[in-house]
Image (cartoon, helix red, strand yellow):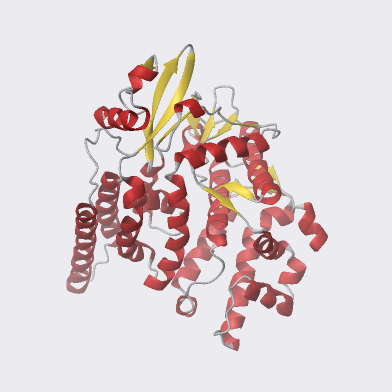
C-alpha cells in the first residue's frame, strides 16, 4: 500500500479538503438528479459508489476524526449503502499508512530517540494502519512488540474536523443537523479519549486484569516504559483479524467457541464491570494459530451509570414491554418517548420500539441462539429498511434517548454483526440482577 508522506495539519487546509469533498458529493447528487429527470434512469448505485470513493479518499488522507467516523459507520451495515460499507471498512486496519520519517519524528518528540535507538529492530513500514494511528513491529532482547504510533495533529484537529464532517455525514445517513449534533457530542468525547494513549494504557491494564479470568479470552501484555501520550507498546500477537480468520472456513465447533468467548467477554464487561470495550470491529479481535481469541485496543471504552444501566436493560423484561402502561413509562424514562409526542405518536413509537426490542433481545430471551440463522439477520435488515423509509417514523426522527445508549447500542450491534459473520451458536441469558428486578 502506498505510504502517505504528510498529513494536513492546519485547520484551514483540513477544512478546505472537507469542503471540497462536500462540494464533489453535492455535484454528484446534482448530476444524478439531472440524469434521472432527463432519462428516467435511477442509477443510485453508481452515485453511492462515486461518493463513497470521494469520501474515503479525503478521510483517509486526513486521518483522525474523519477516518474514525468512517470506521464507526462501517460497523452498522443497515446505516449505509453497500458502496460506503466496502470503502469505509478499510478504515478498520487497512488505511494508507504514514511514511517512516514521520514515525521517527514522533519517536524523537516523545522519547528523544528514534525507534532504532530504543529497539533492536523496528519495521520501517507499518504492519497495519487505522484511523487514529498505525502499528509497527519491533524486537528487543528476544521479545517482540506491537508499537502503535498516533498520527501527527490528530487530537488538535479533532473538534474542528468533526464540525466539518457533519454535513457530509448528514448526506450519507439522512439525519438533520440537530440529530447529528446529538450523536457527535458523544462521539467527540470518546474520540478525544482515544487520542490519549496514556489513558488507553491505564484502561488496557485495568480492564484486561479484571477480565483475565475469562477462560477463552486472552489479552496482550502492555509496556509502560515504551509508551507515552502518542505511542503505545504492547506484546506482539501472531494471528489473523477475525474477518480474515473466517475466510479460512473454521469448523462449526471453533466458530461456536470463539463466538461464545466474545459474548461472554461483552456480557461480563457490560453487566458486571459496567465499563466495556466499545470498538467491536474485526481488526480488534485476533485469532492465533492455536485458534485462541485475543482482544485488542481499549482506546474506546464506555462507562455506564447505574441508573441508566437499570433503565436500559429492564427492556429485557418482556412482561413489562408487553404492558402498554409499564412500557411507555420505561420509554419515557429513557427519553425515547417525549412530552411533545401526542397520543397517536406514542402508539406509533410503542409499536416501533416494542418490535425493535423483541427482535434485538431475542438471543437473551431464547438462551441458546444461532447467529448463523440468516433469517434473523434478514429480519433485522428488513426492519431497519422499513423504518428508515416509513414517512410517519421519519417525521418523528428527532434526537431521542440517552447519549449513553449510543456506544452501548454500537457495541451490541457490532457484536451481533461479528457473531453473524462467524455463524456462531451461543448461549445467552438475562443477567441475574435483572432477573431479580423482573
The C terminus lies in quadrant = bottom right
Q: Residue at image x 39%, y 45%?
A: 89
Q: Is residue 407 above or below residue 211?
A: below
Q: Nearer the viewer, residue 170 or 362?
A: 170
Provide residue 141's location: percent of width, then percent of height: 47, 11
Residue 288 in sight:
yes
Q: Which residue appears farthest toward the front when viewing the image? A: 112
Residue 429: % across, % down = 74, 51
Total numbered circles: 0
Q: Position of residue 348 (x, y in %)?
A: 58, 79
Task: Report the residue that reaches farthest toward the top.
Answer: 141
The residue that appears at 28% across and 53% down in the rendered structure is 55
Is residue 380 positioned above or below 395 on the image?
above
Q: Is residue 317 left or right of residue 141?
A: right
Is residue 346 positioned above or below 3 on the image? below
Residue 297 appearing in the image: no
Q: Is residue 99 left or right of residue 73?
A: left
Q: Quadrant of the N terminus?
A: top left
Q: Residue at x 26, y 32 (%)?
A: 102
Seen at 61% across and 38% down, the residue is: 206
Amino acid at each position: 500500500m502506498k505510504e502517505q508522506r504528510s498529513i494536513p495539519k492546519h485547520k484551514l487546509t483540513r477544512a478546505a479538503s472537507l469542503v471540497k469533498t462536500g462540494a464533489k458529493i453535492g455535484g454528484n447528487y446534482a448530476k444524478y438528479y439531472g440524469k434521472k429527470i432527463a432519462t428516467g434512469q435511477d442509477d443510485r448505485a453508481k452515485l453511492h459508489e462515486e461518493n463513497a470513493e470521494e469520501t474515503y479518499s479525503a478521510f483517509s488522507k486526513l486521518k483522525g476524526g474523519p477516518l474514525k467516523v468512517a470506521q464507526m459507520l462501517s460497523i452498522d451495515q443497515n446505516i449505509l449503502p453497500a458502496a460506503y460499507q466496502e470503502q469505509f471498512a478499510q478504515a478498520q486496519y487497512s488505511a494508507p499508512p504514514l511514511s517512516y520519517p514521520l514515525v521517527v519524528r514522533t519517536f524523537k518528540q516523545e522519547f528523544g530517540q528514534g525507534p532504532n535507538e530504543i529497539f533492536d529492530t523496528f519495521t520501517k513500514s507499518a504492519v497495519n494502519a487505522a484511523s487514529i494511528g498505525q502499528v509497527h513491529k519491533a524486537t528487543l532482547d528476544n521479545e517482540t512488540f506491537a508499537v502503535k504510533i498516533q498520527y501527527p495533529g490528530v487530537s488538535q484537529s479533532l473538534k474542528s474536523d468533526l464540525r466539518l464532517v457533519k454535513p457530509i455525514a448528514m448526506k450519507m445517513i439522512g439525519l438533520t443537523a440537530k440529530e447529528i449534533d446529538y450523536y457527535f457530542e458523544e462521539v467527540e468525547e470518546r474520540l478525544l479519549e482515544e487520542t490519549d494513549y496514556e489513558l488507553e494504557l491505564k484502561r488496557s491494564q485495568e480492564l484486561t486484569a479484571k477480565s483475565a479470568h475469562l477462560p477463552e479470552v486472552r489479552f496482550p501484555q502492555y509496556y509502560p516504559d515504551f509508551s507515552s501520550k502518542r505511542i503505545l507498546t504492547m506484546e506482539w500477537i501472531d494471528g489473523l483479524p477475525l474477518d480474515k480468520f473466517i475466510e479460512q472456513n473454521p469448523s462449526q465447533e471453533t466458530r461456536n467457541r470463539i463466538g461464545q468467548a466474545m459474548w461472554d467477554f461483552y456480557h461480563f464487561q457490560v453487566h458486571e464491570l459496567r465499563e466495556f470495550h466499545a470498538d467491536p470491529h474485526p481488526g480488534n479481535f485476533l485469532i492465533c494459530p492455536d485458534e485462541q481469541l485475543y482482544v485488542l485496543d481499549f482506546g474506546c471504552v464506555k462507562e455506564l451509570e447505574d441508573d441508566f444501566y437499570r433503565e436500559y436493560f429492564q427492556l429485557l423484561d418482556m412482561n413489562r414491554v408487553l404492558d402498554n402502561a409499564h412500557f411507555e413509562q420505561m420509554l419515557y424514562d429513557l427519553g425515547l418517548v417525549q412530552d411533545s409526542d401526542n397520543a397517536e405518536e406514542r402508539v406509533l413509537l410503542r409499536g416501533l420500539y416494542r418490535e425493535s426490542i423483541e427482535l434485538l433481545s431475542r438471543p437473551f430471551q431464547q438462551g441458546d441462539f444461532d447467529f448463523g440463522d440468516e433469517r434473523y439477520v434478514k429480519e433485522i435488515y428488513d426492519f431497519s429498511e422499513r423504518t428508515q423509509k416509513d414517512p410517519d417514523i421519519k417525521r418523528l426522527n428527532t434526537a431521542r434517548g440517552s447519549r449513553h445508549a449510543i456506544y452501548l447500542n454500537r457495541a451490541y450491534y457490532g457484536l451481533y454483526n461479528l457473531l453473524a459473520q462467524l455463524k456462531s451458536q451461543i448461549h445467552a441469558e438475562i443477567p441475574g440482577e435483572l432477573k431479580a428486578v423482573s
